[in-house]
Amino acid sequence: MIVYSTYTSSYELLPSQVGQSGRVRVRFHFHRFGLATVFQRRLLLHLRHGLLGADFFSFRIDTAALAQRFQYHLGRVKGLDEIEDRRDAVSFGASVTLSEAMPYLAALDRDLGELTRRFAGTQVRMAATVGGNIANGSPIGDLPPALIALGATLGLQRGERPRTLPLETYFLDYGKQDRAPGEFVRVVRIPKFNEGEHFRCYKISKRFDSDISAVMGAFKLRLDGTRIAGARIAFGGMAAIPKRARTTEKALIETYLDRPDTLDEAVEALAQDFSPIDDLRASAKYRLDAARALLRRALTEIGGTSTRKTRVVGFREAGDVASA
């Protein structure tokens, strides 16, 4: 049984709102689905156009150029809304909202909590989903760089067939993801920190709150004393996809946080990992300069400098953080 309802209305936009195309009739469609049996046996066999967060409104413009299609909201389907907090990892179903995920992310690391807080406003966070922020493949989505740096894995499903892959391999190119027709994001799994691991993430935007990233940087280091034994670094806004800085990671291995001169090569290596573009949010030069500054800040903070000397908000010393 499918719990399904549709509400349809229409109105006309003024010609000034649609350029030279004249009047355009816009339809509003609302769809609801329920019951886990639909999720397992019927609905997922027919998905073709993705998942949306919260109660779903689709604005469909009736023009000959646009083929009519249905999209589905699975926010009430059991299984996609689950949060599983285990000793070694926390997992979020695709329809878990950012508001629901925030306390778990903040428990992983204070910077993740601050990052989530800067997702638009409360109303948006109560509607936007973890899976939606990942599945659309935006190069400036805030969660993917942080989750890539943390070593997250993605669970996909097509019909009854599940598949797991590292999140970093899901993004192939601008507008292209490693997802087959009918396959959808079901869950994301984030490993918890091991001994000696430290994390930082920073978002640069024109407005501090409620704005899209110009640059988003995330850094996870594994230390042996002051020696960097492992590194995972990812950026958003620096390429056509959220992307790891692998050359920079290699350059950091066997350097020392208490010997700043050993870190310069790694900071400069960012220019080999990324060739950012100019757009309305930032110039290519600004992006590269900002990325270098964020890497230096992460290295400085993880090296022991108080965040009260490196930040104006989001201080990590405000409470105990396991990965601080």
Image (cartoon, rainbow, N blue to C red):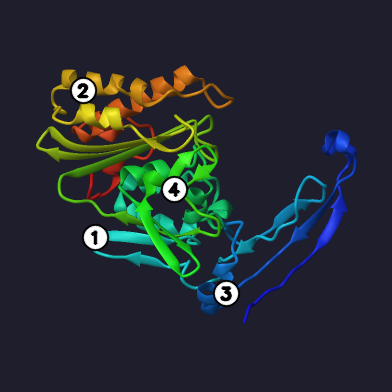
Q: Is residue 9 left or right of residue 191?
A: right
Of discs 2 and 3, which sits in the foreground?
3
Circle 4 sits on which residue? 116
What distance separates the C-alpha of mark 4 from that of mark 3?
A: 34 Å
Percent x, y of residue 76: 56, 70
The amino acid marked with disc number 3 is Arg
Quadrant of the image occupied by residue 257: top left
Cβ–Cβ under 8 Å for marks 1 and 2: no
Query: Mark 1 or mark 4: which comes first in sequence?
Result: 1
Please, what secondary structure does the residue beneath circle 2 have? loop
Percent x, y of residue 260: 18, 21
Of discs 2 and 4, which sits in the foreground?
2
Mark 3 Cα within 10 Å, few/some/many (few <14, many 20+)?
some
Circle 1 sits on which residue? 88
Relative vertical location of residue 305 with respect to residue 194 in this rendering, above or below = above
Circle 3 sits on which residue? 42
Q: Is residue 6 left or right of residue 135?
A: right
What distance separates the C-alpha of mark 1 from that of mark 2?
A: 31 Å
Mark 4 Cα within 10 Å, few/some/many (few <14, many 20+)?
some
Cβ–Cβ under 8 Å for marks 2 and 4: no
